[in-house]
Image (cartoon, grey):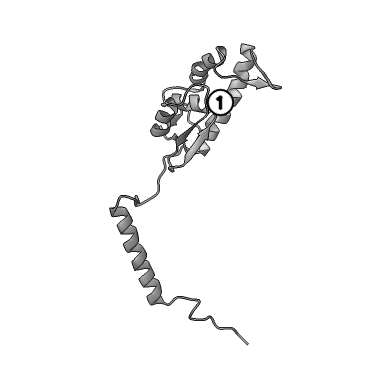
Amino acid sequence: QRLQPSAAVLPSAETHAADAQALGADLLQLHLAGVLELWPQVHFPLPPHIPARPMAYTLARAQSRHIPEGATGMVTGLRHENIVLDALSVRVLALLDGTRDRPAILDAVEPLFDDGRLNVQRDGRPVTDPILRRGMLVTHLDDVLHRLRRFGLLVQP
């Protein structure tokens, strides 16, 4: 014997239309009250890869400048999410205005390691050799840039 769907389980076309009408009215009220933003399409200008001169979301970059040097901090991404960043990511984010390439970014953060405000560790001890540290910073910078892109903090220049 074949089972037939129950009318109680499947809404009728009239019920569906009434629900859609009520939902539309509720969304309009939320929008008019300023609680909900409505956009005709979703478009985040996220780069498909890390640009030669990376640029960060303006709000997140501004927020990162207010986080004390050497401290972790929280910024807001393009998707309105709170994102917690480590101290190096915070400093790098503050520099990403689209004018610096990777070597210039490294040059800008390296003094923070020279005077001990930030450190790179190997086997649990700070790396003090400048050549070894620079090599490690290159790898760390790539990791930071990929993480910032994944978090939605980088934008198309």
Amino acid carrying label 1: it is Leu
28 or 72: which is nearer to us?
A: 72
Residue furthest toward the left? Answer: 32
Q: Residue at x 64, y 12 (%)?
A: 129
Question: How far from the left and from the top, in percent, is residue 106?
Answer: 52, 19
Question: How far from the left and from the top, in percent, is residue 139?
Answer: 60, 25
Relative to 23, say whether 139 is above or below: above
Looking at the rendered image, the quarter that the C terminus falls into is top left
- Residue 76 visible in rendering: yes
Left or right of 13 in this view: 123:
right
Q: Residue at x 48, y 76 (%)?
A: 10
Count of labels in the image: 1
Label 1: how many Cα within 10 Å (few below 14, some 14–19, many 20+): some
Quarter of the image holding residue 17? bottom left
18 or 50: which is nearer to us?
A: 18
Location of mark 1 (residue): 141
Question: How far from the left and from the top, in percent, is residue 149?
Answer: 50, 36
Left or right of 26 in this view: 150:
right
Q: Residue at x 42, y 25 (%)?
A: 65
Residue furthest toward the right? Answer: 123
* Element marked by disc 1: helix
Looking at the rendered image, the quarter that the N terminus falls into is bottom right
Relative to 144, say whether 5 is above or below: below
Question: How far from the left and from the top, in percent, is residue 146?
Answer: 54, 33
- Residue 39 visible in rendering: no
74 or 140: which is nearer to us?
A: 74
